Structures are given as structure tokens and as C-alpha cells.
Amino acid sequence: MRTTLKVVDNSGAKKVMCIQALKGRKGARLGDIIVASVKEAHMGGKVKKGEVTRAVVVRAAMQRGRVDGSEVKFDDNAVVLINKQGEPIGTRVFGPVPHELRKKKHLKILSLAEHVA
């Protein structure tokens, strides 16, 4: 909570702050849904500064183990904004996203991503 995350879609937001991680966990990991407040936004975007929205964590600096024994770790913490139905607000996702999102049923985000790691 209170972590500043980078937004990697074209919804109009630049940075958001995590208000709460859903699913009752203390923190959020790859593929988890969070409630976030928009802290910085582009002019004329779909979301404005101060809005409270939901987001999916697509990159996390904390390492996560995979089934084959390898570990995935990113340089930054990044999210993609979604609406109440779980669909992405933006139409493009920048940078790599992990294929673990497939297990969490975020297939639309995977199809919009330019690189799946």
C-alpha cells in the first residue's frame, strides 16, 4: 500500500498510488488486482488526476519463482488500468509482461502487449 507504480498503457495516466490490494493479501504480486489513485496524468487522457480506479500488476521488482525453477524479476513496478468488468481502459500495453497473467485470466492484456516475457 502507498506504493507508486508506473502505468504502462495509453489510458492517460502516468503514475498511480496503490490504495489497497484486493484478495485480502497484505501486498500485491504479478497478476493481482489493486485499487489505485491516479497521481499523474496526461492532458486529454481517458483518466484524470485524482480518480480512483482498478489496475492489474504486470511487472514487479520482487522476484517470483516459476514452475521450471527459473525466476522472473523486472526493473520497475508497473500496472495496466482496468474497468470494473476487468477490461483494460487503454488500447496498447508498452514493455514486457509475464506469461503468468494467462493463469490469472488477463488474456486481453496479454493480447495487447508488445512483448510477453
Image (cartoon, rainbow, N blue to C red):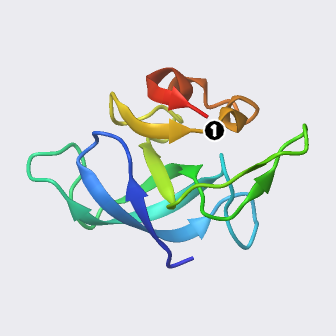
Read off the residue under disc 1. 98
Mark 1 neighbour density, 10 Å: few (under 14) some (14–19) many (20 or more): some
The amino acid beneath tag 1 is: Pro
Which residue occupies the foreground of this view, 100 or 47?
100
79 left or right of 25?
Answer: left
The residue lying furthest to the left in this view is 43
Vertical side of 77 occupied by 55: above or below: above
91 left or right of 25?
Answer: left
| Residue 35 image point, x, y percent | 51, 61
**Picture quadrant of residue 70:** top right
Which residue occupies the foreground of this view, 12 or 63?
63
User: Which residue is painted at 61% across and 31% down in the image?
Assistant: 106
- Number of marks in the rendered image: 1
| Quadrant occupied by the N terminus | bottom right
34 left or right of 102?
Answer: left
28 left or right of 111?
Answer: right
User: Which residue is painted at 43% across and 40% down in the image?
Assistant: 95
Which residue occupies the foreground of this view, 52 or 74?
74
| Residue 31 image point, x, y percent | 65, 46
| Residue 85 image point, x, y percent | 52, 34
User: Which residue is painted at 34% across and 30% down in the image?
Assistant: 92
The residue lying furthest to the top in this view is 111
The residue lying furthest to the front in this view is 70
Which residue occupies the foreground of this view, 22 or 93?
93
